[in-house]
């Protein structure tokens, strides 16, 4: 019971502070499952094309050589 009251108190503080700062509260409910997948895809594309990012994933050359030897 105390944990529920504490959680409600934290939510209340979040709402009060957001109202004081004139900000909207984002609870993650504005985007559905397909929107989340599309957002992750877009972030991955942006990271792959970013010059300072990790780049795109490439397979190790040893795997490709083994595949070519057996064919």
Image (cartoon, helix red, strand yellow):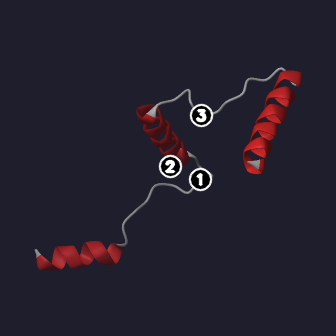
* Category of crowding for the residue at label 2, using alpha-carbon neighbours closer than 10 angstroms: few (below 14), some (14–19), many (at least 20): some
Q: Residues within 10 Å of mark 3 (few under 14, many from 20)?
A: few
Could you say where residue 58 lies in the image, as x and y percent from the top left?
Answer: 40, 62
Q: Nearer the viewer, residue 40 or 33?
A: 33
Question: Residue placed at 29% from the left, 75% from the top?
Answer: 63
Q: Of the residues under marks 1 and 3, which one precedes in the sequence?
A: 3
How many angstroms separate mark 2 from mark 1 (CA)? 6 Å
Q: Which mark is residue 48?
A: 2
List x then y, in percent, for residue 1: 73, 48
Spatial separation of the CA atoms under disc 2 and disc 3: 25 Å
Q: Position of residue 62 (x, y in %)?
A: 32, 78
Task: Count up the numbered dots.
Answer: 3
Mark found first going from the N terminus, 2 or 3: 3
Q: Is residue 46 found left or right of 37 in the rendered image?
A: right
Q: Nearer the viewer, residue 49 or 45?
A: 45
Above or below, comparing residue 12 to residue 50 in the picture:
above
Q: Which numbered disc flags the more N-terminal residue, 2 or 1?
A: 2
Residue depth check, mark 2 versus mark 3: number of the one nearer the observer: 3
Where residue 13 sits, quadrant-wise, is top right
Question: Judging from the image, what secondary structure is the residue with disc 2 in?
Answer: helix
Which quadrant holds residue 67? bottom left
Task: Give the residue number, with chain letter if any, for mark 1.
Answer: 53
Q: Secondary structure at mark 1?
A: loop
Q: Are dots 1 and 3 in contact, CB under 8 Å?
A: no
Q: Are marks 2 and 1 in contact (CB under 8 Å)?
A: yes
Please, what secondary structure does the residue beneath circle 3 have? loop
The disc placed on residue 28 is 3
Residue drawn at 51 percent across, 29 percent down: 31
């Amino acid at each position: 019971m105390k944990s529920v009251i504490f959680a409600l108190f934290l939510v209340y503080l979040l709402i009060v502070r957001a109202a004081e700062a004139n900000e909207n509260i984002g609870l993650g409910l504005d985007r559905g499952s397909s929107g989340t997948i599309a957002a992750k895809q877009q972030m991955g594309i942006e990271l792959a094309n970013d010059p300072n990012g990790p780049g795109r994933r490439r397979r190790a050359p040893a795997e490709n050589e083994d595949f070519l030897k057996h064919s």
